Amino acid sequence: MADIESIIRQVLSYNPQADVELIRRAYDFAAEAHRDQVRFSGEPYIGHPFAAAEILADLEMDATSIAAALLHDVVEDQGKSVDELKTKFGEEVAMLVDGVTKLKLADFYTDEEEEEAKRDDAPKRRRAEFSRGAENLRKIFLAMARDFRVMVIKLADRLHNMMTLDDLPEDRRLRIAKETMQIYAPLAHRLGIWKIKWALEDLAFKYIEPEAYADLSEKVSRTRAEREEDLAEATEMIQKHLAVEGIEAHIQARPKHLWSIYQKILRENVDYSEIYDLSAVRVIVNRVGDCYHVLGLVHDLWMPIPERFSDYIAKPKSNMYQSLHTKVIGPRGEPLEIQIRTWDMHRVADFGVAAHWQYKEQTRGMDDFERKLSWLRQQLFDWQTDSKDAGEFQSSVINDLFTDQVFVFTPRGDVIDLPAGSTPLDFAYRIHS
């Protein structure tokens, strides 16, 4: 049973000044609107917007976004008007719901497009799919340009739909999983919301390649205890040295997610048994200077592996990610990845653009964060202004935003994304493996 008070307690824990009455009113309105509606599973429909709101609370989003998540299906599914939402909840909530509604209408094929996809006229089918994909991509990026929260709510909506995908017919499961892997996981990556990106990728992997997923999942589970011992030993050694140096730090041991492990197996053409860095140690400190101090300590403890160091503090990634990454020969003679960052960097790394509204409500770090976001917002508007049609818009987005990926259409009209620099052999391997 959905308990809105649990979300409210969580929101108050990170923002005591939050407008929790707005959240309560939005929940009551949504619960009444969806009262007679059920999902494919037969469960009450209100569970879905409630779950989306929970995901946003985990990202420490603002009360306006959480209210919009609770209401995000009332226009499309229950015929409520945007004007009614504006009257009851304010213009900002109504605008977010309207934006998410427009994105939802772009999710899946229309009946006509499904029939078109079944025909043998492959060139015409590919044109239809390209046109649909280009127009939907335009809608997504326009929504992001107006307010990034629309896309964050949409990602929460998609994540819960992926978590409950077993309830849908098999053909829809596969189509939604592919769309998630091709569009929504990369968008979560570009927005820096790693928690959602990793979850979407692993869930999509489960449906796109079920045998590979089951096999890898079983192997990872079988070796988990041994890895945890290795990480505990490394963590203890780091902690002792930090205490001697008087550096206050929080240390986490983080397992890598299944899709990234699977990608490494394919990329390096190796067996699972030949991959040693299945986990990473993360050290979180208070100041930037401490990051470099910790790096020196780590390199004193263990031998660094040449060409396996990256300074994303001095040169942040385009999605605002900052950390020091180093790979060393760990205490048991195997590669160990260590990430070092401040708490502010950690918050941005986990929450991406969602952290913007944490800063906004807490009036902390706003100027710097606004500068980091402004390039992307302006780029989105420029793409729209300079593009004559949806196809040109899609090309601009792919060329300018997905710069480290190559997108290739298969003969069946699917989109395959490969790392920049991939060859025709890499493409052939992907579509035949």
Image (cartoon, rainbow, N blue to C red):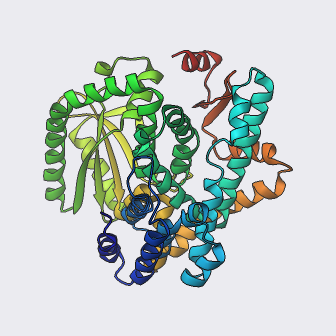
Q: Which residue is drawn at 74% across and 31% down?
A: 116
- Is residue 347 toward the left or the right of residue 188 in the image? left
Q: Which residue is drawn at 49% across and 55% down?
A: 157
- Judge whether 32 appears above or below 148 on screen: below
The residue at the far right in this view is 388
Quarter of the picture holding the N terminus: bottom left
Of residues 188 and 269, the one drawn nearer to the viewer in this rendering: 188
Residue 383 on image: x %, y % = 76, 54
Of residues 103 and 290, the one drawn nearer to the viewer in this rendering: 103
The residue at the far front in this view is 36
Of residues 364 and 156, the one drawn nearer to the viewer in this rendering: 156
- Residue 91 shows up from this direction: no
Q: Which residue is drawn at 77% across and 48% down?
A: 393
Quarter where residue 87 is shown: bottom right
- Judge whether 285 appears above or below 199 on screen: below
Residue 264 on image: x %, y % = 42, 27
User: Total number of numbered labels?
Assistant: 0
- Residue 377 shows up from this direction: yes
Residue 238 on image: x %, y % = 19, 48
- Judge whether 32 appears above or below 225 on screen: below
- Is residue 218 toward the left or the right of residue 384 in the image? left
Residue 136 on image: x %, y % = 69, 48
Of residues 74 and 424, the one drawn nearer to the viewer in this rendering: 74
Q: Residue at x 60, y 74 (%)?
A: 94
Quarter where residue 385 is shown: bottom right
- Judge whether 43 appears above or below 208 on screen: below
